[in-house]
Image (cartoon, rainbow, N blue to C red):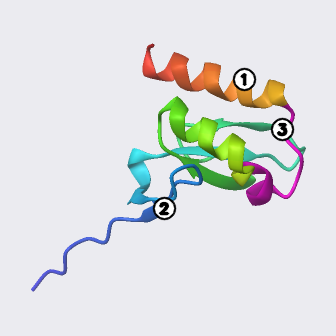
Amino acid sequence: MLKPKKIPQRQCVGCRTMKNKRDLIRVVKSPEGEISLDFVGKKPGRGAYLCPDGACLARARKTKALERAFETAIPAEIYEALLAQMEAANGT
């Protein structure tokens, strides 16, 4: 008898809902301190997950959730760059 395959779950740092890992976008802080989006999930470094919409990124920015996750201050330019990368990936 086969067991059903376990689907990895992750929590969005913006809206704090649990979703399938493949439905979220990974934000990664590299060992060099660079923060970027990781669409493949293979970049090295500390990761946090966001829903693929700007509202969750805005909520994470307002509550400083990414700053807590990465234990560092994140300047406004980084948030704007993340939003631009997210919109470019979504095609909007």
Residue 43 seen:
no
Q: Which residue is mark 3?
A: 34
Of labels 3 and 2, the one closer to you: 2
Residue 74 seen:
yes
Secondary element at tag 2: strand
Secondary element at tag 3: loop
Earlier sequence position, callout 3 versus callout 2? 2
Local crowd size for mark 1, using a 10 Å CA cut-off: few (<14), some (14–19), many (≥20): few
With 37 as the anchor, is 22 left or right in this view?
left
Where is 60 relative to 4, above or below? above
Of labels 3 and 1, the one closer to you: 1
Could you tell me how far apart the alpha carbons at marks 3 and 1 are, in whole angstroms?
14 Å
Rendering coords of residue 55 (x, y %): 52, 35
Rendering coords of residue 37 (x, y %): 64, 36
**Residue at the image position 67 percent from the left and 29 percent from the top:** 82
With 43 as the anchor, is 11 left or right in this view?
left
| Amino acid at pointer 1 | Glu
Quadrant occupied by the C terminus: top left
Residue stretch rendered in magenta on the structure: 66-75
Q: Is residue 39 magenta?
A: no
| Amino acid at pointer 3 | Glu
| Residue found at the far bottom of this picture | 1
Earlier sequence position, callout 1 versus callout 2? 2
Q: Which residue is mark 2?
A: 10
Could you tell me how far apart the alpha carbons at marks 3 and 2 are, in whole angstroms?
22 Å
Local crowd size for mark 3, using a 10 Å CA cut-off: few (<14), some (14–19), many (≥20): few
